[in-house]
């Protein structure tokens, strides 16, 4: 059965042992059963400073690209990765790691990035938007 292209890019982070170790080393509270990489939303009980860092991934658009012969052969996927951290430095370190991983291992391009601070949760948010082309035959 074919795998959703968004789940492919999610799995690339969710199954990354080095990233999981990096997140655990920065976190004040460790939950063995959670890697704190979420899709779409972060559960309410984890939206706290002591659980940072955490990552939220969200698909934005997915298009089938059509070639001259009208045969759709690839997907163009745009998705976001948000890194919520207790410090700007943590956000920079994690974002840099994710950017290198996606660029070198998955030929994925970051198309924009910005940082914000959320006073309510007392967390920094590094928001990154990516674009990737995935051959239909690879899923």
Image (cartoon, rainbow, N blue to C red):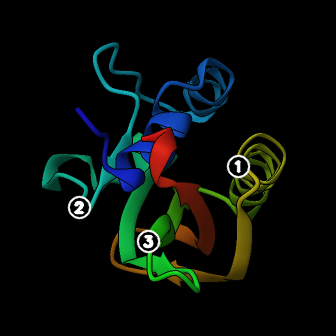
Disc number for residue 41: 2
For the point 36% across and 66% down, the residue is: 58
Q: Mark 3 highlights which residue?
A: 72
Location of residue 56 (image quadrant): bottom left
Residue 119 image position (x, y, % from top left): 42, 81
Tell me which numbered mark, 2 or 1, is placed earlier along the sequence.
Answer: 2
Tell me which numbered mark, 3 or 2, is placed earlier along the sequence.
Answer: 2
Q: Secondary structure at mark 3?
A: strand
Q: Mark 1 highlights which residue?
A: 98
Q: Nearer the viewer, residue 96 or 8?
A: 8
The alpha-carbon separation of the residues under discs 3 and 1 comes to 29 Å
Location of residue 2 (image quadrant): top left
Compared with residue 21, is residue 99 higher up or lower down, i.e. above or below? Answer: below
Tell me which numbered mark, 3 or 1, is placed earlier along the sequence.
Answer: 3
For the point 38% across and 38% down, the residue is: 36
The C terminus appears in which quarter of the rendering? Answer: top left
Assess whether mark 1 and mark 3 are in contact (beta carbons under 8 angstroms).
no
Residue 8 image position (x, y, % from top left): 45, 42
Query: Residue reaching furthest top?
Result: 32
For the point 46% across and 33% down, the residue is: 14
Q: Nearer the viewer, residue 40 or 73?
A: 73
Q: Secondary structure at mark 2?
A: loop
For the point 55% across and 36% down, the residue is: 12
Residue 104 image position (x, y, % from top left): 84, 45
- Give the left or right position of residue 95, taking residue 29 as reference: right
């Amino acid at each position: 059965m074919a795998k959703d292209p968004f789940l492919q890019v999610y799995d690339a982070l969710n199954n990354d042992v080095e990233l999981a170790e990096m997140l655990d080393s920065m976190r004040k509270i460790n939950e063995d059963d959670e890697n704190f990489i979420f899709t779409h939303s972060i559960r309410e009980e984890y939206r706290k400073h002591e659980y940072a860092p955490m990552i939220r991934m969200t698909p934005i658009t997915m298009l089938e690209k059509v070639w001259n012969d009208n045969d759709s052969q690839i997907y163009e996927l745009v998705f976001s990765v948000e890194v919520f951290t207790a410090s700007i430095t943590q956000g920079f370190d994690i974002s840099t790691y994710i950017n290198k991983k996606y660029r070198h291992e998955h030929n994925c391009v970051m198309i924009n990035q910005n940082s914000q601070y959320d006073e309510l949760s007392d967390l920094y948010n590094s928001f990154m938007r990516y674009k990737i082309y995935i051959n239909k035959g690879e899923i």
